[in-house]
Image: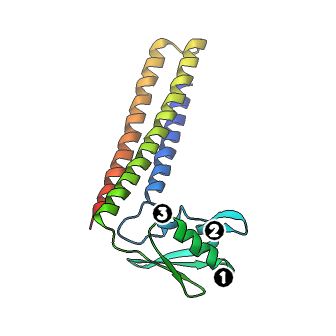
Amino acid sequence: MLDELLSDAKERMAKAVEQTSGEFATVRTGRASPNLLDRVVVDYHGVPTALRQLSTISAPEARLLTVQPYDPSSIKQIEKAISDSDLGVTPSNDGKTIRLGIPEMTEERRREMVKVARQIAEEGRIRVRNVRRDVQHDLRTLKTDGDVGEDEERRAEGDLQKLTDAAIAELDAALKAKEADVLEV
């Protein structure tokens, strides 16, 4: 029973770390990356739709992104959604493809992106701690019901804390790498 709880906690913490790492990819660095547009949502025929579902996004050069909509009639809505986003890029289109020139980031903008990355990391840490809290509650319930003894519960809580520390260390390492990537000129 305790092993199941701990393995479930490990799995859920790994998913939280994975989700946070995916969110790090949406933070802008000095280079063009199709992941930058993951957060862009387009009002497509009155339905909010992720840009990835409406187009092909590629990075043919280090400072250029191209967005090729599957439906050419949606190009205006896509262009508006990109302009309204917090990316700080201006789209231009030729009727079939939208081009996004990724400008060089200023020092101030880089510092803002580091703050965004730190916020994403903190949200990831909160997810991991929430998993720990839920499992601790389950452990206490098992002890109260008499299914496990106090020693077993204490040992399981120690193992749970080790899992939590490992997941948070993984998040911190990912944050450090992202900060270095953002601050790199």
* Mark 2, other Cα within 10 Å: few <14 / some 14–19 / many ≥20: few
Q: Earlier in the sequence, mark 3 or mark 2?
A: 2
Amino acid at dot 2: Gln
Up-down: is 54 above or below 24?
below
Q: State the quadrant of the N terminus.
A: top right
- x and y, in percent, of residue 169 in the image: 35, 42
Single out the mark in the foreground, 2 or 1. 1
According to the picture, the residue beneath numbered tag 2 turns out to be 53
The answer to which image quadrant residue 185 occupies is bottom left
Mark 1 in CB contact with mark 3 (< 8 angstroms)? no
| Residue 72, disc | 1
Expressed as whole percent of the image width and height from the top left, the position of residue 167 reads 41, 41
Callout in the foreground (3, 2): 3
Q: CA distance from mark 1 to mark 3?
A: 24 Å
Figure check: 47 above or below 138: below
Residue 9: where, in percent of width, then height? 51, 35
